[in-house]
Structure formats: structure tokens, C-alpha cells
Amino acid sequence: MAEIIRIKDIARYVGREVTVRGWVYNKTGKGRLQFILLRDGSGQAQCVAFNKEMSPEAFEIARGLTQESSVIITGEVRADERAPGIPGGFEIGIRSIELLQVANDYPITPKEHGTEFLMNHRHLWVRSNRQWAILRIRATIIKALRDWLDDQGFLLVDTPIITPAAGEETTTLFEVDYFGEMAYLAQTGQLYNEANIMAFGKVYCFGPTFRAEKSKTRRHLIEFWMLEPEIAFCNLEELMDIEEGMVCYVVEQVLEKHQRELEIIERDIDKLAAITSPFARISYDDAVARLHQLCEEIDDPERKAELAIEWGEDFGSPQETAIAEMFDKPVFVYHYPTAVKAFYMTPVAGRPEICRSVDLLAPEGYGEIIGGSERIHELELLEANIDKMGLGREAYQWYLELRKFGTAPHAGFGIGIERTVAWICGLNHLRETIPYARLLNRKYP
RNA sequence: UCCGUAGUAGCUCAAUUGGCAGAGCAAUCGGCUGUUAACCGAUGGGUUCUUGGUUCAAGUCCAAGCUACGGAGCCA
């Protein structure tokens, strides 16, 4: 009985008989010679069926295979430059073949398809090379984020998904019937993180978040994954150091572990290799000034109108992209106007119209991937802000209590996983960064 | 929600001024000992998004609707 192997390890088995189990990714026939490209989840290997090396029955099975048919193949591994695959350069000379199922009319062919068709067949699309590569990189990004934080002394502390009240009350919430009472799906774990740092010092939560916002762009999902670190006794500058170190580590890990995947999705590696410390740090004031200057240099009136901004306004998508394009690495923009940010962000001493907030904008037009801030730790100020926003103190009772029992300055941020994946993979839409995207008009499959 | 574009074979698309519904790929059958989106030959395949209207005649023109895509707002 031959050893069952995974195709990613095929190089170690040259000259030996092995068994691989998987699905037919592609097949080309040359009469008495059949080339079957088999994928097993770990990689792809060309399996060659030659009628003189196997029984007539086995050869007929090989000849009748269709795309995505499932098989168990046994044969000898040999090195051959001509063999395609992942890793490629190795093939299996089929000795015997066990057919599990002939797949009929598999809808996704090796040719091009439209977005709607592919999204309707997402449960099959994930088998395709490109999606396989992206989702593997996604997994590494998540692991790298967590590894880095764990190594820096952060503790993973999970926060609830069903919550009694709004996190930020800025966007629309999904409502849940909680035994006759109204509850909501979480938009952020941040408020709970703020409680948890008082127990553990440095924490992060990682999970899905939900926004019932009717936004329909390449940068939005209804359900997306966010990783949110929170740190006690941390200021904005230290926060930026953490974000920068973390992002650099993630990019480094992807470059180290996924050369082949990046090749499959045709990502420009040089642009990723350039992502090293330090990142530029500019203030909102500075960013607005840069936009004003850019506007003056532009002749096209339409473009000019798109980029126009008054101090105090939040950046729209075009402005954000324009600022990011001024740099070839991610750029921090800090000290946003207090009015456009959340109620818990600390005002700047002496300039209460701006707050101790910072966004990290990814290069190449990918926009904001991280948003963070110093949190207000004074009870009176926080109460005043909650009243001003009309949020109602009752729902925030426990959150306010954190400012009564040993309050301390602290800061934190949230990194959007899908946006990070889109940037690192160079994708133009978030729908490919998550296995099953939830979009405004899509919850199937 | 607003603005723009599109909807024709399983998929990707074509169809001139309103005049017989087409191609490539996929599928099926046959051929081929080194294919890389193989190639060669043959075969089958249509509610032209829906409803209504104009016309001798509508894929094409008109009206309404549905769906998708792109962008904006909002945000990670």
C-alpha cells in the first residue's frame, strides 16, 4: 500500500509510489496519453495516464474523467520540468486509479466568467486557483496579526456578538429578537476591550462585526472581520508604533510564506517589499493643506470638485485615495476633527476641535485599513459627550463605571481584515477577500 | 438612497437602418504518446430579464418594473 501524501510535499517523494486524493482541476487528452491536473487542497500535480502502464479498465476511467471529478490515484512520483502544478515540476505516473464520482457539467470552466455568475457559485469558485491563493493569504494575515500581538504580550479576550446597545450608534444595527427583547449584532468589541484592559493590560478581540448599512461599494461588506487591540497606559504615538510594527510583520510574513500565491494572483511583489518602518505620520491639518495644494495643481474641474474639502469635513473616498497616493507606504493621518469622530475619542489639549485619533491609509488607493484613538478616561467628559450625542447614559452604565474604578489613559484601534487582505493581495473588491461575502444584495450561498 | 451602464445558448460575447438567432468555450461522439486555455473532425443546445405598447415585421423602438455591475454617501 502506497503512502498517502499531500501534493505540497510531492518533491520529497521522487522515485516512490504514493497515493494522492483529490479533484480533477483540468484534463487534456492525447489518445493513449492523458494528462490529469489533480488538486488536493494543498497543491496541484499533473498525473499522467499512459495506457501501456495500467489496466484497460483503469485507463478508461482516466480517459472519462471530467473537471472536478473526485479520485484516488496511486503512482510513481517523478521530476519533470514540463509538469505544471503547485509546486509544479513533478508528476505522478498513474499506476491505478479509484473513481469516487464523475462530476457532470461543472459550471466554472477555465475560461472567463462574470461577477454575478461567480458569486452565485461561490461554493464552487473557492476551488479555483486564484481564490485558493487569496484565502490562503487571508489565513496567514490573520495568523500573523495574532502571532505578533501574542508575542508582544497581548491577550486574546473574546467580546460578545449579541449586544444590548449600540457600540457607536453611527451606523445601522442588525436587530435580534432576544427572547422578546431587542438586541443587536456587534459593530465593535471596543467598549468591552476597554473593560478587559483593566483586567489584562493589553488585549485584543477578533471576530465578525455587522453593519446594516446600505452601502454598496468595493470597500464595504455587511459582515466583516475586525481585529481590535486595546492597550492601557498608551498614547497616540505609541499606538502608531504598535500599528506600524504589526502591519510590517504581516506583510513580511505574507512575502515569506506565499511567493507562489502572490504569483498566482499576479501581485506586484516590489510594492509589498517596500512596506517597512517608518510610515509617514501627517496631521489632518496637514492632509487638508496637501489636498488644497493638489486641487490648485489640477486643471480638470470635475476632479477638482471631487477633491475639494473644507477644514472640518471628513475625507470622502476620493480624498482618502489622493492622500494615500502621495506615499508608497501606508500613511498615518492623525488629529481628525472631533465632530466627525466617535464620542469616546480624547480631545487634543488646548485644541478641543480636534481629537487624538489616527487612521492608517493603505497605499495604491486601498484607503483606510485601521482606525484608532486615545479614549476618554475622565468620567465627566465622557458623560458630557454621551449626553451631547443623545445616546442615553443607561445603556452605557457599565462603560462609564470603568472611569470610576481606577481609570487610566488608554488607546486602541481596529484593523479591518478584508481591507487588509484586499490591499496585500492587490484586489479591487472585498468580495474576493472573504470566503462567503455578505453584500447589500447578497447572502447566498 | 442617488447617478451611470448592462441583461441574447451552461459560460463569455456578436447580431449593420426594425427584416431567417450567431461565434468561441463548455457538453456529447470520434482521432492523436508530452499536453500547459492542447489540437483536428462531427453533433446537440435559445421564454433574446419580465409585463405591456408601436409595427406587415421587434433581440433592436417606446413605457413601467426586476436584477446585476460601476461610482457617490457612510465606514473598517
Image (cartoon, coloured by chain):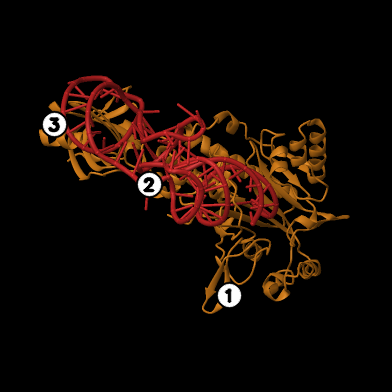
Chain colours: A orange, B red
User: What is the C-alpha distance between the residues marked 2 and 1?
Assistant: 37 Å
Q: Which residue is mark 2?
A: A124
User: What is the C-alpha distance between the residues marked 3 and 1?
Assistant: 66 Å
Using residue B73 as the reference point, say whether residue A66 is left or right of it: left
Question: What type is the residue that disc 2 sits on?
Answer: Leu
Mark linked to residue A54: 3
In the foreground, A198 or A120: A120
Q: Which residue is mark 1?
A: A182
User: Exactly how many numbered labels are in the figure?
Assistant: 3
Question: What type is the residue that disc 1 sits on?
Answer: Met
User: Callout 2: helix, strand or loop?
Assistant: helix
Using residue A303 as the reference point, say whether residue A244 is left or right of it: left
User: Callout 3: helix, strand or loop?
Assistant: loop
The subunit carrying tag 3 is: A
Quarter placement of the C terminus of chain A: bottom left
Q: Is residue A316 visible?
A: yes
